[in-house]
Every structure is written in C-alpha cells, then in structure tokens.
Image (spheres, helix red, strand yellow):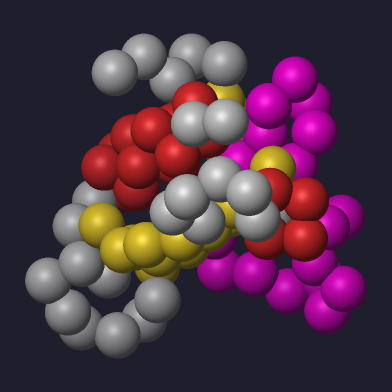
Amino acid sequence: MENDYLTLKRPLASRPSGEWSDDDFDVLADGEVVGRIFKTGVFVAEPWMWTLDIGRFAHRSPTHGYAATRDSAMAAVAKSWQRE
C-alpha cells in the first residue's frame, strides 16, 4: 500500500514536555500532524504503537494499534487514514 502522502517527523515542537525518544515520530499529512508512531518500550512481539489524532479523526477506524516494525506501523496508519 502506498503511503507517500504521509511522512514521519521528529516531534520537536509538538510535545508539551519537550522530550521524546529516538523511536518517537509524528505522522504528517500535507505538513499537518495527524498521528503518532512510537516504540512502547515494552518487550512484546509488536512494540510499535501507532495512533491517529483521536480528537480530530475519531470517525476513522481503527484509530490506534500495535505493529512489529516501524514500517508496518506506518502501513497501518496509512490504511486507517484512507478510510473515511
């Protein structure tokens, strides 16, 4: 599935605490933050969590989930993002 319209960016200004890890990314569409992908820090088979901005995109389903890799998390975001 193509997800060229979504990009990952380090969360420089979007985290109120100003802190983030190397495995923490904002997901952007047309330069606007629409979600987040991050490594949970828990050793599980699917350590990457992804989520859409639920406040703005609660009508899309699913709005969050877990994945084995960052790339598979990005694919899941793209799949959910395409649903209207």
| The residue positioned farthest toward the bottom in the image shown | 42
Q: Which of the 4 image quarters holds residue 80?
A: top left
Q: Which of the 4 image quarters holds residue 76?
A: top left
**Quadrant position of the N terminus in the picture:** top left
**In-front residue for pair 10/28:** 28
User: Looking at the image, which residue is at 17% across and 79% down?
Assistant: 44
User: Looking at the image, which residue is at 24% across and 51% down?
Assistant: 69
User: Looking at the image, which residue is at 26% across and 42% down?
Assistant: 72
**In-front residue for pair 37/10:** 37
Q: Image height check: is 81 above or below 21?
A: above
Residue 24, image x, y percentages:
54, 60
Q: Report whether residue 13 is seen.
A: yes
**In-front residue for pair 28/59:** 59
Q: Which of the 4 image quarters holds residue 19?
A: bottom right
**Main SS class of the magenta portion in the image:** loop
Q: Report whether residue 11 is seen.
A: no
**Image position of 15 (left or right of 22):** right
Q: Which residues are magenta?
A: 11-33
**Quadrant position of the C terminus in the picture:** top right
Residue 39, image x, y percentages:
40, 67
**In-front residue for pair 8/34:** 34
**Image position of 62 (left or right of 32):** left
Q: Image height check: is 49 above or below 28?
A: below
